[in-house]
């Protein structure tokens, strides 16, 4: 492992640790959502309403704008210096803030106007909640852009910690609702959803203030004094880079909305089943893939600015090897252990056995797609770092069309599981086409090494999954009154991880050793100094 790869892995592990805390809290939040809101109409209303500001977060905050901003900032600082970067950022924030304010007002008014024409109970509740939640889109989009700016300064850990606030606020609110036994009174539960929306806004405002403070501490706070939208060229440059990604991102979000709307046609359980499973799958994607992708984006942008295509190819190979090493066993574990996992997390309060069965079918297919979902976060930086936005756009549009067609074919025989399977198949197609394009463009990477990494990970993970046969006996002996199946589940998870690492090492995998070097790297300079003295 080269020193460059060592820095990438070390930085991504720091982000992964911060994201791990946030995503674990997110899982706790989802567990409370299932207990308080259940898996029916109230859960569908909350998730459909919260989906809308999250769409803008993915599209503008963490999507095309944040991705395009990193290479623009990097190149501008190299050519014109940091002061010009600060002037450009003032223009970006002024324009983005105005655009988001208009979007918030238009969607909130639109929800009120649509309300008399909607008859479905959970759809009416979602429209009623939307004006309460939409201002969060403004906060979280600005937060996402600030996070991209800080990543360009190689600040990864602290921005990733900011997402803890939303989960902490919502966990507190949901825990209070659970203790009040709101499941006995539907009217109280409805009032509770409005209060929960206000907690979302409070968390967003506080997180934005903390991120702005970080921006100030790192010396890249926008220089608003004397800025001019007309004289600045940054909006024109960003528009050229953002537009293809914006179209692709918009199409992707349209596909996501279509998934949820089609699921709603299957009954009130389908949307919560997909959403709860989504949150579980988001754990490996957020902990590892997004963390690694953020670091790779910053490093590849610097390599692209120096026209070092060899370094970019090495970074891509390294990133994909690490993704397959970490995510293939995650996929195997979720597919094989999905029933104990879902039972442990959700089966309490208003979440029933019928809700559990509905969620299990989605978890099987979504779980199998974890490596595909994570790989995409590592492949895309190889395009975006070179300011190549159009080709990923064309591939994305093609795969989104395939996804919608597959949804319509598979949703009836497999219900929500068919919608999940369609998403996985479209992601596999997306990744295959992107890698094929990179190979055609001459980016140096070896597909045979990637195939070997996948086969090795599967060869270690599948035998390790044999510990599942121990679970019934462990469940009978180690299930406790308060924590339920937590102890036997953790024992099986630990055994699975140990067996996988041992088998992976025996099969010649380098990744376990590369991970260990990160934790022991700080001791090396001391050892060298001691030897020299």
Image: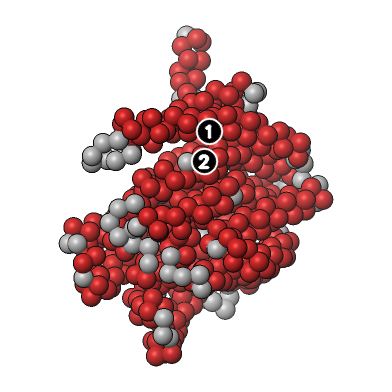
> Total marks drawn?
2
If you read the primary sequence from the N terminus, does the residue marked by circle 2 or circle 1 appear first?
Answer: 2
Looking at the picture, tell me which residue is in the foreground, 384 or 33. 33
Judging from the image, what secondary structure is the residue with disc 2 in? helix
Q: Is residue 160 above or below residue 249?
A: above
State the colouring used for the structure image. secondary structure
Judging from the image, what secondary structure is the residue with disc 1 in? helix
- Would you identify the image quadrant in which residue 239 lies? bottom right
Is residue 422 among what the camera can see?
Answer: yes
Q: Is residue 426 above or below residue 379?
A: below
Residue 526, percent from left and from top? 45, 18
Q: Quadrant of the N terminus?
A: top right
Looking at the picture, tell me which residue is in the foreground, 412 or 517. 412
Contact (Cβ within 8 Å) of mark 2 with mark 1: yes
Is residue 105 among what the camera can see?
Answer: no
- What residue would you read off at disc 2? 336
- What residue would you read off at disc 1? 465
* Residue located 66% across and 37% down the image: 454
Q: In whole angstroms, how far apart are the C-alphas of marks 2 and 1?
A: 7 Å
Disc 1 crowd, CA 10 A, few/some/many (<14, 14-19, 20+): many
- Would you identify the image quadrant in which residue 192 lies? bottom left
Residue 396, percent from left and from top? 68, 63
Disc 2 crowd, CA 10 A, few/some/many (<14, 14-19, 20+): some
Left or right: residue 257 compared with residue 49: right
* Residue located 71% across and 33% down the image: 452
Residue 171, percent from left and from top? 28, 56
* Residue located 64% across and 23% down the image: 507
As drawn, the residue found furthest toward the left would be 180
Q: Which mark is residue 327?
A: none
Residue 217, percent from left and from top? 38, 52
């Amino acid at each position: 492992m080269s020193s460059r790869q060592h820095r990438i892995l070390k930085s991504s592990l720091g982000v992964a640790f911060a994201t791990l805390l946030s995503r674990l809290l997110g899982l706790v939040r989802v567990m409370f959502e299932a207990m308080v809101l259940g898996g029916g109409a109230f859960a569908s209303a909350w998730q459909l309403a919260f989906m809308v500001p999250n769409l803008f977060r993915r599209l503008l905050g963490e999507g095309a704008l944040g991705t395009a901003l990193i290479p623009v900032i990097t190149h501008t600082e190299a050519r014109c210096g940091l002061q010009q970067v600060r002037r450009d950022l003032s223009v970006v924030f002024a324009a983005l803030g105005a655009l988001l304010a208009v979007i918030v007002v238009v969607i909130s008014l639109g929800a009120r106007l649509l309300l008399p024409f909607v008859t479905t109970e959970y759809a009416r509740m979602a429209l009623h909640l939307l004006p309460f939640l939409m201002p969060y889109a403004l906060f979280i989009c600005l937060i996402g852009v600030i996070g991209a700016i800080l990543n360009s300064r190689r600040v990864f850990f602290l921005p990733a910690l900011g997402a803890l606030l939303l989960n902490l606020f919502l966990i507190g609110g949901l825990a209070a609702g659970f203790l009040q036994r709101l499941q006995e009174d539907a009217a109280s539960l409805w009032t509770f959803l409005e209060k929960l929306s206000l907690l979302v806004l409070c968390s967003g405002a506080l997180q934005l203030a903390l991120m702005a403070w970080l921006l100030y501490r790192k010396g890249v706070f926008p220089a608003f004094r004397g800025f001019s939208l007309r004289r600045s060229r940054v909006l024109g440059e960003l528009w050229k880079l953002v537009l293809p990604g914006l179209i692709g991102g918009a199409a992707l979000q349209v596909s996501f909305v279509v998934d949820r709307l089609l699921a709603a046609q299957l009954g009130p359980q389908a949307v919560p089943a997909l959403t709860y499973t989504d949150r579980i799958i988001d754990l490996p994607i957020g902990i590892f893939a997004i963390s690694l992708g953020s670091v790779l984006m910053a490093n590849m942008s610097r390599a692209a600015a120096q026209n070092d295509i060899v370094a970019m190819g090495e970074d891509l190979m390294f990133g994909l090897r690490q993704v397959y090493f970490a995510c293939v066993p995650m996929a195997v574990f979720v597919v094989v252990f999905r029933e104990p996992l879902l039972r442990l997390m959700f089966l309490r309060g208003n979440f029933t056995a019928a809700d559990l069965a509905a969620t299990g079918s989605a978890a099987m297919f979504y779980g199998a797609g974890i490596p595909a979902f994570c790989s995409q976060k590592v492949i895309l930086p190889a395009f975006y770092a070179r300011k190549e936005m159009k080709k990923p756009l064309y591939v994305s549009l093609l795969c989104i069309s395939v996804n919608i067609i597959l949804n319509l074919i598979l949703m009836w025989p497999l219900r929500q599981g068919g919608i999940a399977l369609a998403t996985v198949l479209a992601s596999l197609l997306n990744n295959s086409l992107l890698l094929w394009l990179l190979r055609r463009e001459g980016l140096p990477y070896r597909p045979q090494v990637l195939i070997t990494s996948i086969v090795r990970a599967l060869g270690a993970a599948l035998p390790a999954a044999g510990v599942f046969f121990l679970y019934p006996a462990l469940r009978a002996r180690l299930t406790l009154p308060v924590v339920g199946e937590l102890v036997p589940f953790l024992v099986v998870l630990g055994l699975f991880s140990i067996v996988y690492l041992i088998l992976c090492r025996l099969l010649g995998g380098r990744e376990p050793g590369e991970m260990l070097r990160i934790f022991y790297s700080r001791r090396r300079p001391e050892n060298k100094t001691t030897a020299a003295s």
